[in-house]
Amino acid sequence: MNELKELNKKFQVNFPNLEPHTSKLFSMKLEQVDLGETGCFSSLFLDYINQKPELKSFYNLYPTPHSFKESIASRSFSKEKREILHKELLSQYSNSCSSLKVKDNIDLLLDEKTFTITTGHQLNIFTGPLYFIYKIQAVIHICNILKKEYPDYNFVPVYWMASEDHDFEEINHFFLYGKKYEWKVEAKGGVGRLSPKDMIQSLEDIAFIPEKFTEPYKKQSTLADATRELVNELFGKYGLVVIDPDRKSLKSLFKGVITKEITERRSLELVEKTTGQLSELGYKSQIHPREINLFYLEDGLRERIEWDGNKFRIINTDLSFEKNELLKVIEESPEKFSPNVVLRPVYQEEILPNLAYIGGPAEVAYWLQLKEVFNLYHVPFPILMPRSFALFVNKSNLKKFNKLNIQIKDLFLEESHLKTKYLEANSDNNFHLNGEAGDLEMIFNTIKEKAVSIDKSLKDYVGAEFHKVRSVVESIEKKLKKAEEKNQEIAINQLLGLKAKLFPNGQLQERHDNFLNFYLNDQEFIDKTSAYLDSFDFKFNVLLEDEES
């Protein structure tokens, strides 16, 4: 870890994320901003990464390399589960290309000394927002760090596809070069089962996207299979294993939890209790549990299961079940039950020999509501790690930035505050009237003392007159600032233009732009960014492309 930081300082970083035989050197400058200074993260997430003592009861182990020693020692995973997982993964990869490293990692899962590090994400077409890339880079990096720390064990990076999710509108588009590309089709049920064959035809003007990225959608029969192949194209050489949880063999390992959730329905009570405790500490709830935290899943259908006091009903359908009927379906067809946001993490940890989950700030926050549910179902609660956060500044934008006398962290300011900060740093004229306002206040305090000594009833009158004068001063200050903005108009427009490019639509770049915005200009983009993202250093990384590279 220290060696990596030293290399980062020199901007010549030996790839910790790559296989040894593909190690390279890239030149790029890394600057970091404290997450709290960005204004982009919730207090719950920030307090977690800052190890606020009041939050300790909501998780088990804080994410440091040393924490994994205890996690490894306490994590058991049966031989039977390993064999089922291994067989299912071989089946899932049977119609997809995979690297030798992926095949080796799948086989390693049979070894009792092998554990997984997992991240999950929706099946966004062409990977969706850029942070999808950073999530996967994080799990690969962590596995490599852990292998160095614990050489007697194996660590497999896993991408868990949210194939059962039914929110098609969240995944059916991506942003490239400022344009929104959208797959328009009627979609129902789990998105992983959708056929993607007509997707390429429905998207306009994407002929410039390399065929290796479009071919999976043409060739595969389901969106889940297409996503696996696309992700394998990007990360297969690092041994990333992609898993589709929408499988009967995997759901069979989850039957006990499904049955208990249906018959006892205690998750609601436990999550609400934890939510109440977090609320007392001043935090907002991220997720809202149901009485039954399961969906009924079939082709074209994913609807909630509700208990009406007599029967279990599938909402928005005519389907209903007596208790014994539903228990029989669980036993014979567990694949027809899909966990919601409360139970999905439990399902993941039930079927993987997992040590840590890597997620975004909202994910980390909602996992903190779930520890008691894990305890209820006797499933180990993993180490929670935030994904990597990054802003990539290419050569063109870096040149613009270097002409402006601002700091990297200033770019995260809201526009009005950014303009003020720029003017304060670059203006020869002081447009603030704080000193003058202070002098006026002293004068009015003296006047108020004299007035009160003559007539106490004049106190409020003098105070009101002072507020009128103070308002006038503030109005003058605004006009002075506006005039100075006019003087600096060219530079400010350049600054705001840079801000708009780096924060498209007012969002973080990583939450908006697709990776192709950068990959199409530089096919080493993923490798370059990987080299500078330390998954155990919880900062916002600003990656400045070397102007001479």
Image (cartoon, rainbow, N blue to C red):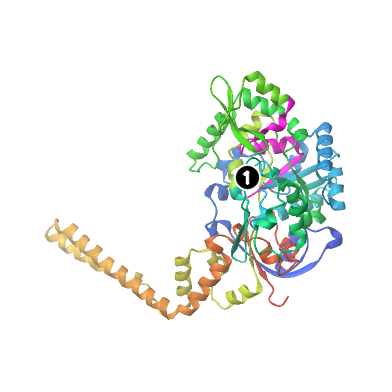
| Image quarter (top left, top right, bottom left or bottom right) of the N terminus | bottom right
Q: Quadrant of residue 310?
A: top right
Where does label 1 land, which residue?
187
Left or right of residue 225, residue 292 in this image: left
Vertical order, 160 against 476 (above or below)? above
Amino acid marked by disc 1: Ala
Residue 406 place in picture, x, y as percent = 54, 72
The relative height of residue 155 versus residue 532 in the rendered view (above or below) is above
Answer whether residue 431 is visible to the viewer in this image: no
Name the residue furthest left: 454
Q: Position of residue 284 (x, y in %)?
A: 50, 43
Q: How many labels were placed on the picture? A: 1
Q: Position of residue 119 (x, y in %)?
A: 70, 47
Using the image as rendered, state which of residue 522 and residue 40 is in the foreground.
522
Identified at 75% across, 37% down, the residue is 247
- Quarter where residue 274 is shown: top right
Q: Quadrant of the C terminus?
A: bottom right
Q: How would you rate the neighbour count of disc 1 (Cα within 10 Å): few for under 14, some for 14-19, many for 20 or more?
A: some
Q: Is residue 279 left or right of residue 132?
A: left
Whole-percent x, y for residue 367 in the image: 61, 41
The residue tagged with tag 1: helix, strand or loop? loop
Residue 139 magenta: no
Give the extent of the magenta segment: 332-361
Q: Nearer the viewer, residue 410 or 321?
A: 321
